[in-house]
Amino acid sequence: MTNKHDGLARNSMDKLIRYHGEAEQTNEWTFFVKEMYSDSCVYSCEYGGTMLVEARGVAEIMATHYGRDMAHGWEEWTFPYVGTYVNEQGQGITHWMNRGPGLRADGSFYQTPGLSFMDFDNDGKIVKQLDFFDLAHQMKLCDELEEVGLLAAALKENWVIPMKKKIIDMLS
């Protein structure tokens, strides 16, 4: 049974997915943030226990997750959605892929899975988002991309090297 809240959440999730598709084409990831996220939204990404990146409010979300992070090495990546789920309370889950540039020799994609958990308010705006992805496989994927010359230098410098250092420090 659907109600107004899960219908709004479903519509918002579908709109967010469309916006992400547009952003992949233009590499401009901030144009939809004010429309999709509440002013008090908390957007978090847990990097495999190494660090939690958290943005509070639209300005921080635009400056970090969709601004700084997407514009420094991720330009050739796409993030196609595999599936979505919305419950009656207006909470949603998306399953997506971190898909790197190019194809493997066997024709398969260079990719690893990710999940987002979102809570929507009565206006259909996201009030809380938590992203997870498999950090170990993401690091392996970046190594694989580097071996074939597809890893952007900016991504290696700004994300891969610092993240590997954090992982090593955490495990030491």
Image: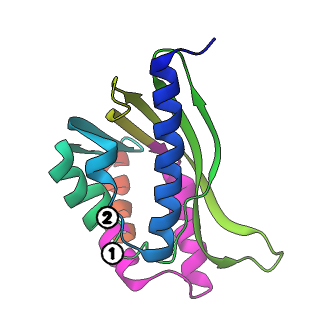
Asked if the magenta segment contains residue 133, the reply would be: yes
Q: Position of residue 125 (x, y in %)?
A: 34, 35
Label pair 2/1, CB-CB below 8 angstroms: yes
Q: Position of residue 33 (x, y in %)?
A: 30, 52
Query: Which residue is labeled 1 in the image?
Result: 72
Dot 2 falls on a residue whose secondary structure is loop
Looking at the rendering, the stretch of residues picked out in magenta corresponds to 132-159
Residue 115 appearing in the image: no
Query: Which residue is labeled 2 in the image?
Result: 69
Residue for point 39% across, 68% down: 160
Residue 155 in which image quadrant: bottom left
Chief secondary structure of the magenta portion: helix
The quarter in which the N terminus is drawn is: top right
Dot 1 falls on a residue whose secondary structure is loop
- Work out which residue is located at the far front of the displayed protein and give it: 4
| Dot 1 alpha-carbon crowd within 10 angstroms: few under 14, some 14 to 19, many 20 or more | some
Instruction: Please tell me which residue lies in front, 101 or 167.
Output: 101
Residue 97 in which image quadrant: bottom right
Residue for point 60% across, 30% down: 85
Instruction: Please tell me which residue lies in front, 38 or 82.
Output: 38
Asked if the magenta segment contains residue 26, the reply would be: no
- Work out which residue is located at the far top of the displayed protein and give it: 1
Residue for point 52% across, 25% down: 7
